[in-house]
């Protein structure tokens, strides 16, 4: 199974409602889609969102990275030589993690097809079904309480609450949400780097004292501030999850060895795909640090790849893969099945895609 061509397209999917964080507001998924074609007629699909405020990747940079150095390095290679392909992909250029992830995902799709097995079984086969949380965008407290109650009524047992715009109002937001949903629902909060270290400790302690009962706090401080992250971890009882601080296995190793966070968040668009995500899983297993797997605003293409990884590995104990659920439509035939909070994989080879509607590949 030899790579003969790599083609690119664009997918556009409106969201059910605007997605708001401390960093940005988004109304639709606008992602680059990758199609890797082989001499056997097998096709692998991947995807990359332009999330400039987090990964630094734009639509133009993703397309440029794939069309020039990446494509040049991979055309003609055999899928059987998978390690060689992955090494060439990672060494084709520095950074550009979303572009690499899109190609990586399509390659793993082909790898599963080559051996006629669903990818999650080749990677570990721990389970076939996972349960995700759902994200509540940052808004005024009343709207967030309403959105949280709506999610609870759809069956969600875990909500991820976006905060980080104004710490004083964040406390009001969290109190309103807890009062609305009660204490049978787990609440996670994600500050998206929105606080300073001392500010984070001060307000998180206030939330503790208010009895809001938070499962964990995600990336309370700036991505580069490992010492600040450690300061927060050392000074609150709420577990801390490192997200934007971790792009590579080396980042994960440093965070774990510094004890700068209690938990690790894996996102394929930050790691450059499954290949490096597996290394982070191995590190986490070695040190006994549980992982969450998350996504950007992505369609079912790349999120299906994350589902396969989550289903394969027992160290991934927390799931934040609600991207496709937030979309108002699904133009992708095949892949993981999203029934609100419940995500199920089929036994189709690779990632199991059949067809992607409305995307023109060139």
Image: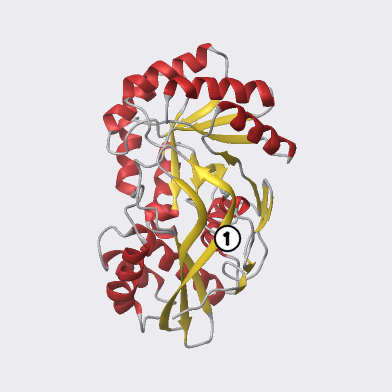
- Does residue 337 appear anywhere in the picture? yes
Residue 5 at x, y = what percent? 41, 83
Image quadrant of residue 246?
Answer: top left
- Does residue 213 appear anywhere in the picture? no
**Which quadrant is the C terminus positioned in?**
bottom left
Residue 52 at x, y = what percent? 35, 52
Frontmost residue, 129 versus 15: 15
87 left or right of 125 in image: left
Q: Quick check: 51 above or below 78?
A: above
Q: Quick check: 125 above or below 209?
A: below
Q: Quick check: 251 above or below 217?
A: below
Residue drawn at 62 percent across, 23 percent down? 178
Disc 1 on helix, strand or loop? helix
Residue drawn at 69 percent across, 32 percent down? 149
Residue 199 at x, y = what percent? 35, 20
Image quadrant of residue 353?
Answer: bottom right
Residue that badge 1 annotates: 300
Residue 206 at x, y = what percent? 47, 14
């Amino acid at each position: 199974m030899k790579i003969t061509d790599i083609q690119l397209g664009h997918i556009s999917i409106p969201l059910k409602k605007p997605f708001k964080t401390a960093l940005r507001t988004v109304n639709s998924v606008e992602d680059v889609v990758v199609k890797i074609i082989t001499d056997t007629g097998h096709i692998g699909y991947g995807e990359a969102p332009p999330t400039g405020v987090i990964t630094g990747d734009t639509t133009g940079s993703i397309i440029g990275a794939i069309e020039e150095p990446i494509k040049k390095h991979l055309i003609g290679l055999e899928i059987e030589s998978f390690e060689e392909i992955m090494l060439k992909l990672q060494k084709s250029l520095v950074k550009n993690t979303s572009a690499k992830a899109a190609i990586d995902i399509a390659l793993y799709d082909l790898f599963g097809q080559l051996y006629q097995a669903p990818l999650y079984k080749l990677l570990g086969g721990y389970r076939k079904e996972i349960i995700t949380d759902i994200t509540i965008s940052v808004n005024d407290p009343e709207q967030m309480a309403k959105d949280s109650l709506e999610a609870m009524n759809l069956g969600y047992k875990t909500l991820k609450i976006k905060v980080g715009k104004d710490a004083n109002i964040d406390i009001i937001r969290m109190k309103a949400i807890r009062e609305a949903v009660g204490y049978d629902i787990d609440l996670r909060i994600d500050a998206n780097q929105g606080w300073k270290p001392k500010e984070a400790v001060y307000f998180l302690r206030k939330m503790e004292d208010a009895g809001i009962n938070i499962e964990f706090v995600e990336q309370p401080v700036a991505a580069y501030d490992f010492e600040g992250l450690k300061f927060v971890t050392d000074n609150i009882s709420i577990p801390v999850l490192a997200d934007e601080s971790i792009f590579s296995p080396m980042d994960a190793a440093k965070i774990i060895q510094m004890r700068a966070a209690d938990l690790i968040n894996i996102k394929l668009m930050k790691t450059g795909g499954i290949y490096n995500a597996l290394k982070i899983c191995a590190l986490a297993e070695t040190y006994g640090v549980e992982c969450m797997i998350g996504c950007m605003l992505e369609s079912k293409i790349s999120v299906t790849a994350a589902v396969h990884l989550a289903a394969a590995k027992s160290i991934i104990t927390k799931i934040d893969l609600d991207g496709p659920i937030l979309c108002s439509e699904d133009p992708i035939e095949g892949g993981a099945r999203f029934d609100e909070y419940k995500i199920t994989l089929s036994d189709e080879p690779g990632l199991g895609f059949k067809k992607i509607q409305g995307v023109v590949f060139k």
